[in-house]
Amino acid sequence: MTISRRDLMKIGLATGAALTRAPVVRAQAALSDARTVRMVKVGGLTIFDPVFTSANISLDHATAIYDTLFSLDSKFLPQPQMVGKWSKSDDSKTYTFELRGGLSWHDGTPVTATDCVASIRRWAQVKPGGQLMMAMGADISKKDARTFTITLKEPLGVLIDILAVSLFMMREKDAGRPATEQVTANIGSGPFKFNHDLARPGTSFTYDRYEKYVPRTELSEGLAGGKIVKVDRVIWDNIGDQQTALAALQAGEIDYFENPPSDLYPVIESDPNLALQVLDKSGQNYFLRMNCLQKPFNSAKARQAILNLIDQDTFLSVLAPDLRYAGTVNSFFGTNNPVSNDENTSWFKKGGDPEKATQLLKEAGYVGEKVVILQPTDWAEASNASQLLAATLRKIGMNAELAPSDWAGLVARRNNKGAVEEGGWSIFITSESDYSRGDPMSTSSLVASGENGWYGWPSSDEYEALRTKWADSDTLDKRKALARKMQQIAWDLAGTVLLGRATVPIARRKVLTGIIGMPEIVPMWNMQKASA
């Protein structure tokens, strides 16, 4: 490749930073050896409970220390994980699950069916698939020490698919908490054990191989199969400055850098020791979420104004400026899913439609209410996009104000359903995999159940009725027809506004191999590292 003078300047800056900055990791340990992997993740880990939050870093943490009943393989098909064998009754209403042998919690006690029953019940309080299961009259009960049943009033053909998505098993004493209370014990039965003694909130978290973990005998595939841990320890270092993180990667002080800024791709590609790698080939859809409970976005017309206003190309120039990795998206169900469609997409225009947006805002009765945009300062692309959003809203007369914080602060504040004067919010920007947007049974942002739903809390009984029918649809053609009807409603409801799509690479040292690529989750088993 040809490196421009601008790129050479960046290389010089990165090298200079590596030579002149205060050591980030050396103060804690020498250069990592072949049995230790050091990673820099996006955002700080402050919420450990994957039921309490859907933040990706919390899901990665949960995937390491907890295990699941079923897991998705590379073709996104559910495969048994903790379950040894399972069956369903002739009327398809009763499912019986038996745990495989050798499962134990990190405190040394055995995993039991009672733990699983409690975990499913807690998860079902807040997760879309679980809520649907319980709405269909599910009874979840222990049969013996290793066996439990789920009994439904009506057949639910997608039950196993629902159980395979982000349902982590916890000890009964932890899962007995309400879903609105965080679990902080961090004791699971998964392949990694959280090292409480070495936990340094705001600085680093350490995960050790759980020596008593018994993996499945099948080959690792996607998130399924044998979870073989090939290193002794994984450390997550919290380095908020991206330039400093890159310098640490170049110096060999860390091995993995999640979501490096796109303007530094040439620096990474020119370094013989580094590589860019796309783990989630489905790509990430960036979107903004509005608070539908509070002014001004409790008005559908105000939300539709933003839908018509946004020019995805402009936002992608900030979020994912490398055109090799970016593209627009106008289907509510993502770009590459079987149910993606073009229903009700007349709002999608190159450059957006500020005139239409201004008209809709006037019809909504907007009178200058403050619009608070949550700005994640430790996610550079989203931080810049938040500033662009504020400027874009001001152009049509909105009183937009930024509320900067790190991602952990944003995650905490978005729980507040109150008005902005009470510490609430109006808009935040986030992302999720394109694959996830094709699954309204498990993806929280595709729910429209009001205050019982995901942050932003849009509400549509008509949409929810169609989503319920999805579970009973036994063919792709039926789901495609439902998806068109749901998209018609969703874009009128306008609780979500898409900003574009990108496949976002991670940066790693070439000695680190075996990283599993799946949407949303980066598992830490299967990774291995050659000696330096």
Image (cartoon, rainbow, N blue to C red):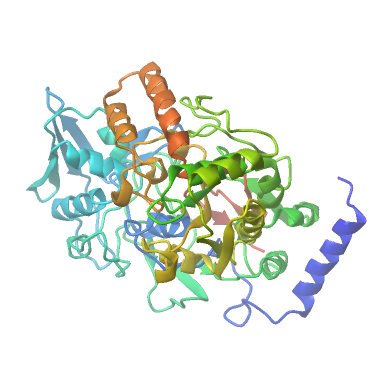
Residue 90, percent from left and from top: 12, 22
| Placement of 482 over or under 415, stated as above or below | above
The quadrant of the image that shows the C terminus is bottom right
Seen as rendered, the residue at the extreme right is 5
Residue 108, percent from left and from top: 23, 66
In this view of the protein, which residue sits in the foreground, 407 or 70? 407
| Placement of 277 over or under 86, stated as above or below | below
User: Taking 515 as reference, is 127 left or right?
Assistant: left
Residue 451, percent from left and from top: 30, 52
Residue at (76% x, 55% y) in the render:
263
Disc count in the image?
Answer: 0
User: Image quarter for residue 26?
Assistant: bottom right
User: Taking 94 as reference, is 288 left or right?
Assistant: right
In this view of the protein, which residue sits in the foreground, 191 or 67? 67
User: Taking 36 as reference, is 463 left or right?
Assistant: left
Is any atom of residue 458 visible in this view?
Answer: yes
| Placement of 51 over or under 85, stated as above or below | below
User: Image quarter for residue 198?
Assistant: bottom left
In this view of the protein, which residue sits in the foreground, 516 or 31? 516
Residue at (72% x, 68% y) in the render:
247
Is any atom of residue 511 visible in this view?
Answer: no
